[in-house]
Amino acid sequence: MNCCHCRSGLNRGTADYTGSRGGYLIVLRDVPAWTCPQCGEALFEESVVERIQEVLAHIDEQAGRLRDVA
Ligand SMILES: [Zn+2]
């Protein structure tokens, strides 16, 4: 697999995933990823992205409970 920016060969490693939703900003550290030794670009495999989406869905659900506290 090659970097989509600089075409260097990617290494197996980990990267931080940063995502922002309406109500929060989230950083998931050390997520399995392919990383570029040249430009530092990180690529997440589809299975990992699906996992991340599941985690975010749980957080969405739980974050909604904060709005119910009055
Ligand atoms: Zn690159």
Image: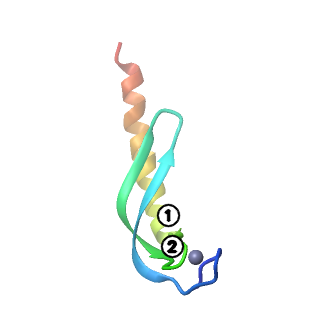
Q: Which residue is mark 2?
A: 45
Query: Secondary structure beneath disc 1?
Result: helix
Residue type at mark 2: give it: Glu
Quarter holding the N terminus? bottom right
Q: Position of residue 49 (x, y in %)?
A: 50, 64
Please tell me which residue is depicted at 54% across the width and 87% down the height of the picture.
9
Q: Nearer the viewer, residue 10 or 61?
A: 10
Q: Residue furthest top?
A: 70
Q: Position of residue 44 (x, y in %)?
A: 50, 69
Figure check: 45 above or below 70 = below
User: Where on the picture, by quarter, is residue 68?
Assistant: top left
User: Where on the picture, by quarter, is residue 13?
Assistant: bottom left
Q: Which residue is mark 1?
A: 49
Q: How is the image coloured?
A: rainbow
Q: Position of residue 22 (x, y in %)?
A: 53, 34
Real-space CA distance between mark 1 and mark 2, rounded to the nearest whole angstrom: 6 Å
Question: Mark 2 and mark 1 in contact (Cβ < 8 Å)?
Answer: yes
